[in-house]
Image (cartoon, rainbow, N blue to C red):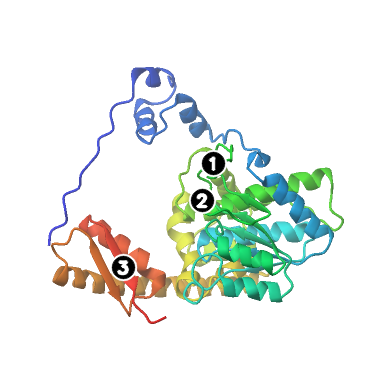
Amino acid sequence: MPPLPRRWEIVPPAPQAYISALPDVHPVIVQVLYSRNLTDPAEARAFLEKRPGPDNPFDLHDMHRAVNRIRRAIRQGEPIAVYGDFDADGVTATALLVRTLRALGANVRPYIPHRVQEGYGLNQRAVRKLAAAGIRLMITVDCGIRSPHEIALARRLGMDVVVTDHHLVGGEPLEATAVVNPRQPSCPYPHKALAGVGLAYKLAQALLRVNQKVPLKNSAPLSEEDLLDLVALGTVADLVPLVGENRALVSGGLERLNRSPRPGIEALMRQAGLQPGKVDAWAVGYILAPRLNAPGRLEHADLAYRLLMAEDPQEARLLAQELDTLNRRRQELTAEMQERARDLVLKQQADWPLFFIAEPEFPSGVLGLVAARLVEEFYRPAVIAERREV
């Protein structure tokens, strides 16, 4: 079965007014910028100069409410949980916010759900578990915006909830203390495409700036720049557009990664054959991010979280080895499942405009990867599901 022919969309040439507004930029670069939807010369200039534009964290809707509730929890010693996601964006966001809250003196613990046993986002079993453990404030990162029932349950069980999420807003209102998401219609923040870790960083940024003016009793030094390496990892891994604030954050994060990586990240870099000073966005996306994602795909993302939080070089080295081993397993499993899916398509669905495969032996952690490979090879939509009893 031959693949469908690719349908190329040719972008028109940049207008002369656009070219004239960037006289010092090579014409080829000007056309590339225009073709990549940077059609405003001011935006193109900001992109080249890596300027984020307006980036005050308090321009995000509900940020004041989120900061006030978190600071009250810290002052009163209330147990806090940071509820994340199992992909690299969610894990880096969890690590970033836990580090920030601990530096501010909070009693905080992470919670990352198991992909197979719990699924994506908030789930009622986890909410009940956290409430039973005495958690009084739950902060979500990279999830929560479409979990009205779980948030309502948390409130009934005595927990307040602060949601930080970059996904599309659902239809039902949330009973949360604060909802920080630039995609809300009520949010004036100009940068709508932040990753989950980018939003966690904005919350951390707001907390740290307020703490500079009114320090909490047991807070320790921590700068915004200390967190940028985690922002770069999660932002690149989540494949959000590297424009505007994302580009500026990743640029600063790559500098931090190459200058003074934290023990866990340095161990992962060395395990992958990367040397500090040589890490760029490509290396993050194709070498580091797959290793950070591997535990969440095959086992539990807690392994990646522990690596990011590791302070002991020996512990970091052992965790990096484990992540590398899991990534090799993930590669082998993906190749095996891809071949199996390809055989099924060629035998049963050769003429279908959309491929649909549901097999019991297809593990959920690699389904998206296998579907993407089919799309790449045959140039048509593909849906792959794991069939199992529930």
The residue under the point 55% across, 49% down is 254
Secondary structure at numbered mark 1: loop
Say which of marks 2 and 3 sits in front: 2
The residue under the point 16% across, 56% down is 3
Coordinates of residue 206 in the picture (x, y in percent): 71, 46
Compared across the picture, whether 186 is left or right of 72 comes to left
**Separation of disc 1 and disc 2 at Cα?**
9 Å
Coordinates of residue 219 in the picture (x, y in percent): 82, 56
Query: Which residue is labeled 1 in the image?
Result: 185
Secondary structure at numbered mark 2: loop
**Separation of disc 2 and disc 3 at Cα?**
25 Å
CB-based contact (under 8 Å), mark 1 and mark 2: yes
**Separation of disc 1 and disc 3 at Cα?**
33 Å
Q: Residue 384 carries which label?
A: 3
Can residue 223 be seen in the rendering of this structure?
no
Quadrant of the snapshot with the N terminus: bottom left
Query: Which residue is labeled 2 in the image?
Result: 169
Q: Which amino acid does label 1 sit on?
A: Pro
Coordinates of residue 270 in the picture (x, y in percent): 53, 64
Can residue 31 be seen in the rendering of this structure?
yes
Compared across the picture, whether 355 is left or right of 305 comes to left
Quadrant of the snapshot with the C terminus: bottom left
Coordinates of residue 192 in the picture (x, y in percent): 52, 42
The residue under the point 13% across, 58% down is 2
Secondary structure at numbered mark 3: strand
Badge 3 density bin: few <14, some 14–19, many ≥20, Cα 10 Å: many
Say which of marks 1 and 3 sits in front: 1
Q: Which amino acid does label 3 sit on?
A: Ile
Badge 1 density bin: few <14, some 14–19, many ≥20, Cα 10 Å: few
Q: Which amino acid does label 2 sit on?
A: Val
